[in-house]
Image (tube, grey):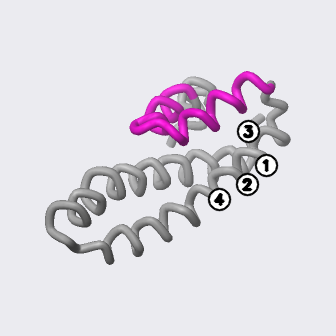
Amino acid sequence: MFGNHFTSFRKISFIEGISYMILLFIAMPLKYFADLPVFVKVVGMAHGALFVLFLVYLFLAARENNWNIKFNALAFVASLVPFGTFYLETRLKQMVPVTNEN
């Protein structure tokens, strides 16, 4: 039922969420409180690339698994909200049959 794009989407979603947390809670405070803007530049670039991958794999996984527009919108909004991708991961985990969880 679930193909490679689903698994890749789950992994990229999780990594994108971590990069967002690093950007918000480490790089941004370093920029404003320690006058170290280079961390925002580096982490922001990595997060941006991961966000693009997130969108690509959301499209591929949605097409592969016939997800409805409501779920796609939820996934997209989750990527914009801090900790949202971790909520999305719980939803994705519920979609996977127990026999596929290894």
Q: Earlier in the sequence, mark 1 or mark 4?
A: 4
Instruction: Examine the image and state in which quarter residue 62 appears.
Output: top right
Picture residue at 15% right of the left edge, 68% below the top: 34
Q: Earlier in the sequence, mark 1 or mark 3?
A: 3
Helix, strand or loop under label 3: loop
Say which quadrant the N terminus sits in: top right
Q: What residue is disc 2 on?
A: 56
Badge 2 local density, few (<14 within 10 Å), some, or many (20+)? some
Q: What residue is disc 4 on?
A: 52
Q: Earlier in the sequence, mark 3 or mark 2?
A: 3
Residue 58 rendering spot, x and y as whole percentages: 70, 45
Q: Nearer the viewer, residue 51 or 57?
A: 51
How far, Cα to Cα, is label 1 from label 4?
12 Å
32 to 1, vertically: above or below: below
Under mark 1, the amino acid is Leu
Looking at the image, is mark 1 or mark 4 nearer the viewer? 4
Helix, strand or loop under label 1: helix
Looking at the image, is mark 1 or mark 3 nearer the viewer? 1
Under mark 4, the amino acid is Val
Picture residue at 72% right of the left edge, 32% below the top: 72
How far, Cα to Cα, is label 1 from label 3?
12 Å
Q: Answer yes or no: do the residues labelled 4 and 2 have beta carbons within 8 Å?
A: yes
How far, Cα to Cα, is label 4 from label 2?
6 Å
Residue range (magenta): 69-91
19 to 65, vertically: above or below: below
Q: Answer yes or no: do the residues labelled 2 and 1 have beta carbons within 8 Å?
A: yes
Residue 22 rendering spot, x and y as whole percentages: 32, 56
Looking at the image, is mark 3 or mark 2 nearer the viewer? 2
